[in-house]
Each structure stands twice: as structure tokens, then as C-alpha cells.
Image: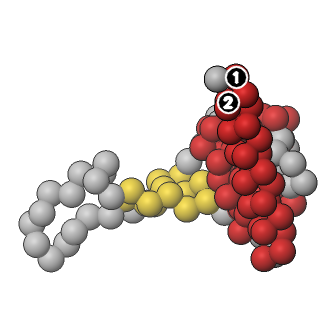
Amino acid sequence: MAIRHKDDYINKFVFQEETKTYKCLEKELRLIFVELPKFKKSLSELKSLTDKWIYFLKEAASFDEIPESLGEVAEIEQALNIANFINMSPEELEIVENRGIAMQDERGRIAYAEQ
């Protein structure tokens, strides 16, 4: 059974087991399909968390930096950071790792000096 959402880019489907007499509550299995080409909202139009996640899924590859309104959601910011690491070359990953090591070493030196 398809349920049309108020936004035309979201379709919700509820599945019911047919061969046995299991009771299948709607909350147990719900699939939501988003038609990304139909999602036309701009960054400034994003109001709900759902809109922000859909925008992330559609536009993440085109970001040079994390948009402020998406960075407000910690999980989306984390997903964008993971996406950035995935797209790095081995050389870029090594540079980032070396910078992280250098920063940790510097923190250690500062902590030692403070003691």
C-alpha cells in the first residue's frame, strides 16, 4: 500500500505479511522512498530534519564546505566529514593523519609544560 506524503518527492510504503497470520504493525516495517530528482528545495528552504537529510543525500558531493544550517545537526556534520574522508586520495589521507598526529603531539607538549 502506497501512502502519498504531503511533499511529492516522498512515498511511504507499508508492508503486510500475507502467507502466515502474523500481525504486522505499521511501525515495525516502514520503507520511505525519496525521489531525489523531485526534491527542489534550496538550502535556505530547509526547515525539517527530513528536508536536511534529503538535501544532504542529494547535494553532499557538491559541497566544498559544510553549510551552516546542515552543520547544526551533529549527525549530518559527521556524515559530511565521513564523506570527505571517503573521497580523499591515499596521499590526502596521509596528510590529514599526519596533521592529526602533529596536533596530538602539540597537545601533549602543552600538557607536559603545564605540569
Q: Which mark is residue 114?
A: 1
Look at 74% across and 61% down and name the residue there. 97
Dot 2: few (<14), some (14–19), or many (≥20) neighbours within 10 Å? few
Q: How is the image coloured?
A: secondary structure
* Residue type pointed to by label 2: Ala
Q: Residue furthest right?
A: 64
Camera-side residue of 33 and 103:
103
Residue furthest to the top? 114
| Numbered label attached to residue 111 | 2
Inspect this view and state whether residue 14 appears: yes
Circles 1 and 2, Cβ within 8 Å, touching? The answer is yes
Q: Nearer the viewer, residue 70 or 50?
A: 70
Q: Secondary structure at mark 1?
A: helix
Residue under the point 83% across and 41% down: 67
| Number of marks drawn | 2
User: Which amino acid lies under the numbered mark 1 shown in the image of this protein?
Assistant: Glu
Q: Say above or below: 104 vs 96.
A: above
Where is residue 56? Give x, y as percent: 72, 52
What x and y, as percent, mark residue 17? 22, 69
Q: Residue at x 78, y 60 (%)?
A: 98
Q: Position of residue 44 (x, y in %)?
A: 85, 35
> x, y (%) of residue 86?
71, 68
